[in-house]
């Protein structure tokens, strides 16, 4: 098949269909991150964090501003109530946009020290908030803060949705980054993007089993090593396939960890999100551009 696709399994051919079309929506970004569909508003948001803003795109108006300044927001997600949660690279905080328009801090400290630079976030069906906290905000003061970390290592955290207590669920990462649950929430995937600061460092996705109580992780295993680039943001479809942003676009893995196909993009992809009313359109943030493609798959 001609076009920006690589097919390694028949299941991927079924996902993209007979006439797949990758559509450019905008090329007016510096680095597109935190792609997230907002069902209650019927548009997608995308963090343009070097420009200190979150943008929005809809079919009628195209690209516009969602929030500026954004404290260099990176990853975004939406909870069951339709509230947007954002990881602030410069602000060193996970915040939630309340219905009245105010920004409420969800997490900004652990064991008395400031978080380093929250990167990506996901909300479980029980209301708990899970996020990664690598040290990019310290390493990149141009869009972070440059302050010496107050945490002694990079961690993955869970915030209880009722008590707002923060706990560590993993601290065995070089640079924890993207994070996503499987459709039934029995598995949590977490990306390690250490390779951004050393070619021979981690560029993999780890797979964890979620304990029956839904509060901790066990049985860490390597799900996939990503080549080229690193596994930044990713999403699951309802069949458990994982759509991973990478150096060449979106790489799609089945639940067994086998690469079944690629949606190639002209620039490095950093995040993606399923959207529209049927959750069958995949939005892709790829450096300066935002793309979309309609699939025969539904976002989980």
Image (cartoon, rainbow, N blue to C red):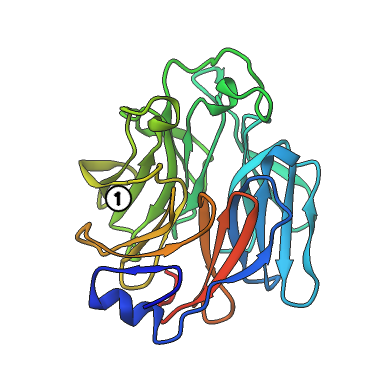
Q: Quadrant location of residue 72?
A: top right
Looking at the picture, tell me which residue is in the foreground, 155 or 15. 15
Up-down relation of residue 63 to residue 72 (above or below): below
Up-down relation of residue 93 to residue 37 (above or below): above
Residue 77 seen in the figure: no
What quarter of the picture does the N terminus occupy?
bottom left
Q: Residue furthest front?
A: 2
Q: Residue furthest top?
A: 148
**Element marked by disc 1:** loop
Structural crowding at the residue carrying mark 1, measured as other residues with C-alpha within 10 Å and reported as few (<14), some (14–19) or many (≥20): few
Residue at which label 1 appears: 213
How many marks do you count on the picture? 1
Looking at the picture, tell me which residue is in the foreground, 161 or 262. 262
Residue 2 seen in the figure: yes
Q: Quadrant location of residue 87?
A: top right
Q: Residue at position x 74%, y 55% from top?
A: 28
Where is residue 247? Give x, y as percent. 44, 48
Looking at the picture, tell me which residue is in the foreground, 223 or 129. 223
Q: Residue at position x 41%, y 30% from top?
A: 175
Judged left or right of residue 39, residue 208 is left
Up-down relation of residue 263 to residue 246 (above or below): below
Where is residue 155? Give x, y as percent. 41, 29
Where is residue 192? Give x, y as percent. 37, 37
What quarter of the picture does the C terminus occupy?
bottom left
């Amino acid at each position: 098949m001609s076009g920006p696709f690589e097919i390694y399994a028949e299941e991927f051919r079924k996902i993209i269909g007979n006439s797949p079309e990758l559509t450019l929506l905008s090329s007016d970004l510096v680095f597109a991150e935190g792609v997230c569909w907002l069902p209650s508003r019927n548009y997608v948001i995308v963090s343009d964090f070097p420009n200190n803003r979150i943008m929005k795109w809809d079919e009628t108006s195209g690209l516009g501003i969602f929030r500026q300044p954004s404290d260099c927001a990176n990853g975004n997600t939406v909870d069951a109530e339709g509230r947007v949660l954002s990881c602030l690279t410069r602000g060193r905080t996970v915040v939630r946009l309340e219905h009245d328009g105010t920004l409420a801090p969800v997490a900004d400290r652990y064991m008395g020290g400031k978080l380093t630079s929250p990167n990506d976030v996901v909300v479980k069906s029980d209301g708990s908030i899970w996020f990664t906290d690598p040290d990019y905000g310290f390493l990149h003061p141009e869009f972070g803060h440059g302050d010496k970390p107050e945490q002694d290592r990079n961690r993955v955290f869970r915030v209880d949705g009722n008590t707002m207590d923060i706990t560590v669920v993993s601290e065995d990462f070089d640079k924890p980054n993207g994070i996503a649950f499987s459709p039934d929430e029995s598995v949590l995937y977490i990306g390690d993007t250490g390779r951004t600061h050393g070619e021979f460092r981690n560029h993999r996705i780890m797979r964890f089993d979620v304990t029956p109580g839904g509060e901790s992780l066990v049985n860490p295993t390597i799900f996939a090593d990503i080549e080229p680039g690193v596994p930044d943001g990713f999403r699951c479809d309802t069949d458990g396939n994982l759509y991973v942003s990478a150096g060449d676009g979106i790489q799609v893995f089945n639940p067994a960890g086998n690469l079944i196909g690629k949606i190639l993009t002209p620039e490095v992809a950093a995040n993606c999100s399923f959207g529209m009313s049927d959750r069958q359109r995949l939005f892709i943030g790829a450096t300066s551009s935002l793309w979309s493609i309609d699939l025969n798959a539904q976002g989980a």
